[in-house]
Image (tube, grey):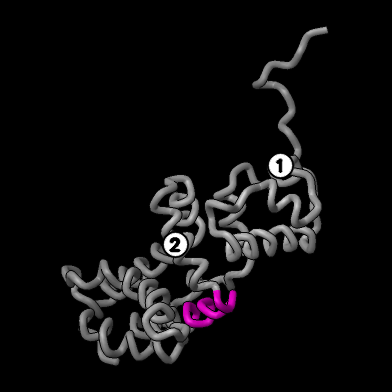
Amino acid sequence: MATQSPETAAPQRRSKITPEREQEFYQAVLDLLQEGGYEALTIEAVAARTRASRSTLYRQWCTKPQLVVAALRSCKRPFALEGIDTGSLAGDLRAVAEAVGEAGEACGGDTALVYALGHAALQNPDLLQALRAALIEHEVKTIQAMIRRGVERGEVAADNPASEFVPAQLIGAMRVRPLIEGRPADRPYLTRFLVASVFPALGLTP
């Protein structure tokens, strides 16, 4: 009997798991990361912690970076920045501050975890790429689109050199304040940051 070629063979099906079971996997990943860091985390350890088979985990998440990113996204409140369009750049950025400030508290105390992953990502290109694609790039592109709309409306000069740094400023402020002051970068803090630093650089009136 003729065998199927790789091109015609049916694709392997992913086993279905419930949202509750999926969350158990994610929580185990986050707990293990906090206990031992990224390098100590293994698929085998997650399987043992959740009493699951390794094959179940590998079918759902092919690599460790994919599983880690999925776990981080599970506890990160969506920024929903793509829905922001207040009609002015200042209004859009204030709305970003609100969304980012709320998201910064979604996982409650994950700052050390994020910094540990950031350090690991510098040594692991696959992890770095996964973190960028899943947690950063979309938000950056959305903020850049807000800046472009501001330029089109004449609110910001097209050649303003500060425009390209706005995404890094907002995301950086969210991550750095807990390290420096031991407090989350909440909405009031990020709003003050906008008014004192970002708006003047862009030539916006608070």
**How dense is the environment of label 1, judged by Cα within 10 Å: few (below 14), some, or many (20 and up)?**
some
Q: Quadrant of the N terminus?
A: top right
- Queried whether the magenta region covers residue 24, the answer comes back as no
Say which of 182 and 132 sits in front: 182
Is residue 87 visible in the rendered image? The answer is no
Image: 168 above or below 186: above
Q: Quadrant of the C terminus?
A: bottom left
Q: Position of residue 63 (x, y in %)?
A: 59, 44
Please state if 205 lies on the left or on the right of 115 as rendered.
left
Please state if 186 lies on the left or on the right of 75 as rendered.
left
Residue 184: assigned label: none
Q: Position of residue 79 (x, y in %)?
A: 52, 72
Name the residue: 79% across, 63% down.
20
Q: In the image, what residue type sits under mark 1?
A: Arg
Q: In the image, what residue type sits under mark 2?
A: Ile
* Residue at which label 2 appears: 136
Name the residue: 26% across, 72% down.
151
Q: Secondary structure at mark 1?
A: helix
Q: Position of residue 34 (x, y in %)?
A: 58, 65
What is the residue that sits farthest to the right in this orientation? 1
Name the residue: 47% across, 63% down.
116
Say which of 151 and 25 sits in front: 25
Please state if 190 lies on the left or on the right of 200 as rendered.
right
Q: Identify the magenta region.
A: 99-109
Quadrant location of residue 91?
bottom left
**How dense is the environment of label 2, judged by Cα within 10 Å: few (below 14), some, or many (20 and up)?**
few
Q: Secondary structure at mark 2?
A: helix
Is residue 139 visible in the rendered image? The answer is yes
Residue depth check, mark 2 versus mark 1: number of the one nearer the observer: 1
* Residue at which label 1 appears: 59
Q: Position of residue 93 (x, y in %)?
A: 38, 80
Name the residue: 27% across, 81% down.
198
